[in-house]
Amino acid sequence: MKKRYTLSLFALLIWSLLSAQPNRDSLWQIWHNTGLKDSLRLRALNALSYSYVHNNPDSARLLAQTLLAYVREKQSPYWQARAHSNIGLSFRMQSDFSKAIEHYEESIALSKKVGDKNFLSAVYGNLGDIYRLQSNFPKAIECITKCLALAEETGDRQKVADAYISIATLYYDDEPGDIAKTLEYLQKALEVYEALKSEKGLALVYGNLSAVYLFQDELDKALDFNNKSMAIQQKMGDMSGLATSLHNRATIKSYQGRYQEALADFNKEIDIFKKMGDQEGLADAYNSMGDLWMQQERYPLAIEVCSNALQIARAIGPPNLHEMYACHCLYSAYQRQGKYKQALDYLEQFVASKDSLQQNETAQKLKQMEIQRDSLGKEKEKLQMEISHQQAIQRKNRSLGLLTAGGLGVLTVALAFWVRMLYFRRRSQLLQIRSDELKKQQLLNEVALLRTQVNPHFLFNSLSILSSLVHVDANLSEQFIEQLSRSYRYILEQKEQSLVTLRTELEFIQAYSFY
């Protein structure tokens, strides 16, 4: 049974880059030292919680819940986001994906609240890992794309490269697997890690390239990249990474028929995992060694190591892939030896293990569907509330519109009356002015008429007086004629004038009084 080797998990990468393994006793003492600043104590408790995530998720979760309870009282969304993230990671390590998603989403909401884009990027990466494990690749891609965008926005090139690794993993795992896309994103990650001179990142890319070329049966390329990864891991003292590379190199050499070299690498890998206490890695190593013995048709040795793998796998917990592979190895070994009873027994265990895994997977999918249904229910409720809110706003707007229209109508009528009033007032003023002008003109006409009437009578009377005066007093007649001429000169010259000077008027009066 040929296994498809997976690429390095991106969630573990993101978290492993945070810090080296801390001194738990020191962290515990810092947390309990109430004389220290809260920020220092909370950082210690958070690191302590994370330190237990991989080998003791229950303890990690308990510590994270202690952190969460404390920071809720302090109303600190920054630390609440980190506590929820640690709780989510602890559930992820126990394959309780629905609870992991729940806490990751809480962490995302809190990180958005405080604007912590750097941490938000990491949480989106871990959430994408959950969806990848559930084979929900569209959601996984969505999360990792957000992770990548935030990393680019904050200028965190390390996280940008990590996101490229994650996207490569998704394309590789998505059946049937897009190898071209996988290699494209691994190359992008490689370029960033080279620019950053990140040895850990380069080792990771080389190891993943080795796994891809191994899957494609390009064994020479796979071995070349694996050796590059191993050289960096040995330099850094990365024992976990070195064990993985030994495993991959042993697999490559077994396909090349270099069985003794492959066996030596498997033994080195087993020694490392025993020292680290990594039971999952140990079970995987024994199963792969069993495959190696099966290729050489050395079935008793295959049975020995696969039995070890089965024992360890069952001690790990619920049915898992290591248990299924071990049962298949034992079934094949006994069957090829003609020991059909034992073969049948392990075949039944293999089927039961496989069915159990499928049931677990189905249960996880059902949980996810339940979460999605609840989420849809909440979204529906939010939508209904939003619709009600919008309807209330529309009713309010309609009422306001009617009031506004009514007000505008009243204002329009008032404005019309005001304009009409101004019109009539202006017209009245114009009529009054016209009337005054007409009265004035009438007076002028009357004066003119009187003048025209006065002039002939005045002349006739003056001539009559002059005719009688000539025979009486010649000098007086001469003076009379002179004054008469002055009077008529005044009348003729000032006939068209409405105003004359006082002197002119006095002279006229003096001349007129002579008569």
Image: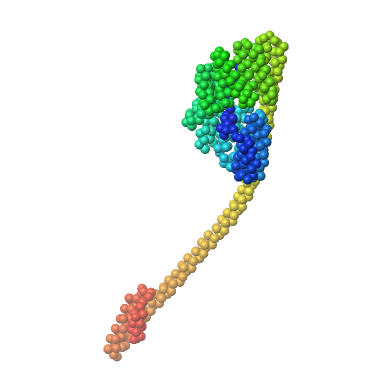
Relative to 257, does residue 24 appear above or below in the rendering?
below
List x then y, in percent, for residue 76. 62, 43
Residue nearest the observer in this picture, 307 or 385 = 307
Please tell me in which quadrant of the rendered image residue 131 appears: top right
- Relative horizontal placement of residue 350, taking residue 221 as reference (left or right): right
- Relative horizontal placement of residue 413, taking residue 363 as reference (left or right): left
List x then y, in percent, for residue 441. 43, 71
Look at 53% across and 33% down and name the residue there: 159
Residue nearest the observer in this picture, 449 or 360 = 360
Is residue 311 visible to us here?
A: yes
Look at 46% across and 67% down and name the residue there: 434
Is residue 80 visible to us here?
A: no
Please tell me in which quadrant of the rendered image residue 63 appears: top right
Look at 64% across and 33% down and name the residue there: 52
Look at 67% across and 14% down and name the residue there: 331
Residue nearest the observer in this picture, 432 or 410 = 410
List x then y, in percent, for residue 177. 57, 22
List x then y, in percent, for residue 440. 44, 72
